[in-house]
């Protein structure tokens, strides 16, 4: 009989113990974040066009893509766009300027008032940057649904990835997603961008394990050469293989290929359903390991299979909602 003494760490991780004993999963609520499209807040045409693009999430930017003189106008455009309610089921995210800039506090208050799904905090370097942002948006009256996303784009953010992600363990901090800023990381580190992302991979991997350790999502950096379809697809595959949930994008042409690559394939979904069904068969429901189609299949594969099916179902639900809204 297995007991708590066999899992001493479970004494302070009762949730982990329950999962080990029963592989019972907490209710899986998945929001696909395959394609996350940036657009400059000063570009009204782009804000309008995004209403009809099939991106899972939109980042309406007030930061690096907006020139200093255009910041106040961009803030007005972006907040009006979010309040319009014209973006259907897409997740709406406002990227503000950092609190220490001349625009940061006004951006945070305006964004909180517009009630987006999330506010993306740029140049996060220390856990305190998230804790402070959470306090500011709370003081500004942001509704509970407004989460924080964190840009991982400075050398210090890589060194502190674990502590930054750990702020998500306290619900007061509202952190739900890490976003890689690979252009900034390349600039700050003086590394070279190569096709295989040789210099970038360690930063991506650090961010992914930090996110996973604290139950957060994580999305990859952008691919600048938006006319290079083959190179873009290769980089999406690369991010997916590493474990990214999706990729940030800069151009509408990148949305559809990105959605395709970050969706579970029909074969993956069918295989996952076979695993779920096999474990549900009489006699198998208590077994730790079984054979499915000649392959050793453990309960950890069952957990992965459930996640794959949950993502596929969430994507299906989103496309049905889009069709009902007349957008696809
Ligand atoms: N979001 C929504 N719509 C966009 C868009 C975006 N990111 N980028 C381009 N579009 C729209 C254009 O407004 C244009 O719409 P129209 O047909 O109604 O005129 C259409 O897509 C085609 O655009 P195109 O002419 O191919 O591109 P461009 O030369 O106008 O712009 C960029 C190229 C790179 C400047 C532009 O795509 C862009 O600003 N991307 C986002 C940059 C950003 O936010 N960076 C910050 C994070 S890294
Ligand atoms: Mg940046």
Image (spheres, rainbow, N blue to C red):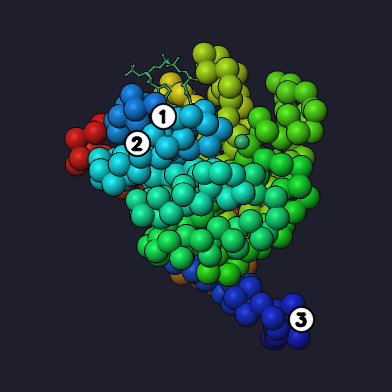
Give the residue drawn at x 35%, y 51%. Answer: 114
Q: Residue at x 71, y 41 (%)?
A: 154
State left or right for residue 163 relative to residue 24: right
Asked if the beta carbon under badge 1 is closer than 8 A to the nearest atom of ligand 1, the reply is: no
Report, in whole angstroms, how far the alpha carbon at label 3 lies from the one at label 2.
Answer: 54 Å
Give the residue drawn at x 58%, y 50%.
99
Asked if marks 1 and 2 touch (Cβ < 8 Å), the reply is: yes
Q: For the image shown, how many numbered marks are present on the structure?
A: 3
Q: Is mark 3 within 8 Å of ligand 2?
A: no
Q: Quadrant of residue 287?
A: bottom right
Q: Is residue 325 above or below residue 215?
A: above
Q: Which residue is mark 3?
A: 8
Give the mark nearest the N terminus, 3 or 1.
3
CB atoms of marks 3 and 1 within 8 Å: no
Disc number lying in front (3 or 2): 2
Q: Which residue is mark 1?
A: 42
Q: Is residue 167 visible?
A: yes
Q: Residue at x 63, y 56 (%)?
A: 129
Quarter-of-image position of residue 142: bottom left
Label 2: which secondary element: helix
Q: Residues within 10 Å of mark 1 (few under 14, many from 20)?
A: many
Helix, strand or loop at disc 1? Answer: loop
The location of residue 35, given as percent across then percent down, is: 46, 36
Q: Residues within 10 Å of mark 2 (few under 14, many from 20)?
A: some
Identify whether 264 is placed above or below 295.
above
Residue 285 in the image: state x and y as whole percent. 51, 70
Residue at the spot of label 2: 77
Q: CA distance from mark 1 to mark 2?
A: 7 Å
Q: Is residue 243 visible?
A: no
Based on the displayed image, in which of its 4 quarters is residue 1 positioned? bottom right
Question: Position of 50 compared to 174: left or right?
Answer: left
Indicate whether 182 appears above or below 217.
Answer: above
């Amino acid at each position: 009989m297995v007991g708590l003494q066999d899992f001493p760490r479970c004494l302070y991780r009762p949730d982990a113990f329950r999962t080990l004993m029963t592989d019972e999963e907490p209710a899986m609520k998945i929001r696909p974040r395959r394609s996350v499209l940036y657009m400059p807040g000063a570009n009204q045409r782009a804000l309008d066009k995004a209403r009809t693009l099939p991106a899972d999430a939109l980042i309406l930017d007030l930061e690096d893509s907006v020139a200093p003189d255009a910041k106040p106008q961009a803030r007005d455009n972006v907040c009006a766009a979010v309040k319009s309610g014209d973006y259907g089921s897409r997740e709406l995210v406002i990227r503000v300027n950092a609190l220490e800039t001349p625009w940061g506090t006004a951006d945070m208050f305006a964004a909180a008032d517009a009630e987006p799904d999330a506010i993306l905090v740029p140049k996060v370097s220390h856990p305190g940057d998230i804790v402070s942002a959470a306090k500011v948006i709370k003081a500004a009256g942001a509704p509970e649904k407004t989460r924080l996303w964190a840009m991982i784009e400075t050398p210090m953010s890589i060194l502190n990835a674990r502590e930054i992600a750990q702020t998500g363990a306290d619900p007061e901090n509202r952190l739900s997603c890490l976003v890689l800023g690979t252009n900034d990381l390349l600039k700050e580190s003086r590394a070279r961008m190569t096709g295989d992302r040789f210099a970038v991979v360690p930063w991506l991997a650090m961010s992914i394990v930090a996110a996973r350790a604290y139950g957060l999502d994580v999305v990859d950096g952008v691919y600048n050469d938006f006319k290079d379809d083959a190179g873009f697809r290769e980089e999406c595959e690369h991010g997916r293989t590493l474990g990214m949930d999706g990729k940030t994008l800069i151009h509408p042409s990148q949305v559809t290929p990105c959605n395709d690559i970050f969706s579970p394939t029909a074969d993956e979904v069918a295989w996952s359903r076979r695993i779920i069904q096999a474990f549900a068969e009489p006699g198998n429901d208590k077994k730790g390991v079984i054979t499915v189609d000649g392959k050793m299949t453990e309960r950890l594969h069952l957990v992965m299979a459930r996640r794959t099916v949950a993502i596929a179902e969430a994507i299906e639900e989103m496309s049905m909602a889009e069709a009902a809204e007349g957008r696809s």
